Amino acid sequence: MRFVLTVVLNAVALWLTTLILPGLHVTAYASDNPQLAIIVTYLLLALVWGVVNSIIGGVVRFVSFPLYCLTLGLFALIVNGFLFWLVAWISGILGFGLTVDNFWWAVGGAVLMGIFSAILNGIFNRRKADREKDHD
């Protein structure tokens, strides 16, 4: 259940990010129902983001650890931008999804999506903690 909630929250964060940044565009897959197609597209993009971030992101973060230390963590912006751009590339191969105008839009998108994800996860984790406290 937690995995599904994480994918949904990442999809909402991605949707908010694409609303704000003009350099990011989402193209839904071909369907008779355009509203359902765009929702499923955002969910699929969030799923791709989760897979890329956990598998490839872990390897890249491990390999680039010295650069993280050298730049006091600022290299994380570049790594997250690269991962965001990689999600756009993978979704383009699949025939739907995210289009990023250039690398700096990817960095901005990754930063903004991280902020939105943190806020949404904070809201939903607080509600969960409040419900657990009420049951005690």
Image (cartoon, helix red, strand yellow):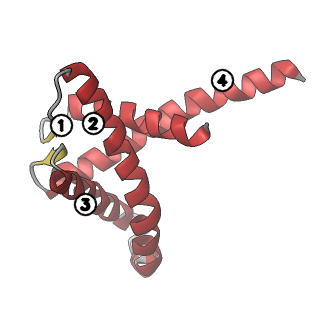
Local crowd size for mark 2, using a 10 Å CA cut-off: few (<14), some (14–19), many (≥20): many
How many numbered marks does the figure carry?
4
* Residues at circles 2 and 1 in contact by the CB criterion of under 8 Å: yes
**Foreground mark, 2 or 3?**
2
Question: Where's the N terminus, which quadrant?
Answer: top right
Observer able to see residue 14: no
As drawn, is 81 to the left or to the right of 11? left
3D distance between C-alphas at marks 4 and 1: 34 Å
Question: Residue under circle 4?
Answer: 127
What amino acid type should be assigned to the residue bearing mark 2?
Thr
Q: Which of 102 and 15 is in front in this view?
A: 15
Question: Residue under circle 1?
Answer: 29
Give x and y (percent) for residue 10.
42, 39
3D distance between C-alphas at marks 2 and 3: 16 Å
* Residues at circles 3 and 1 in contact by the CB criterion of under 8 Å: no
Q: Which mark is residue 41?
A: 2
As drawn, is 52 to the left or to the right of 123? left
* Residues at circles 2 and 3 in contact by the CB criterion of under 8 Å: no
Give x and y (percent) for residue 22.
13, 35
**In the image, what residue occupies the spot 16% across and 52% down?**
92
Q: Which of the two labelled residues, at mark 2 and mark 4, occupies the earlier sequence position?
A: 2
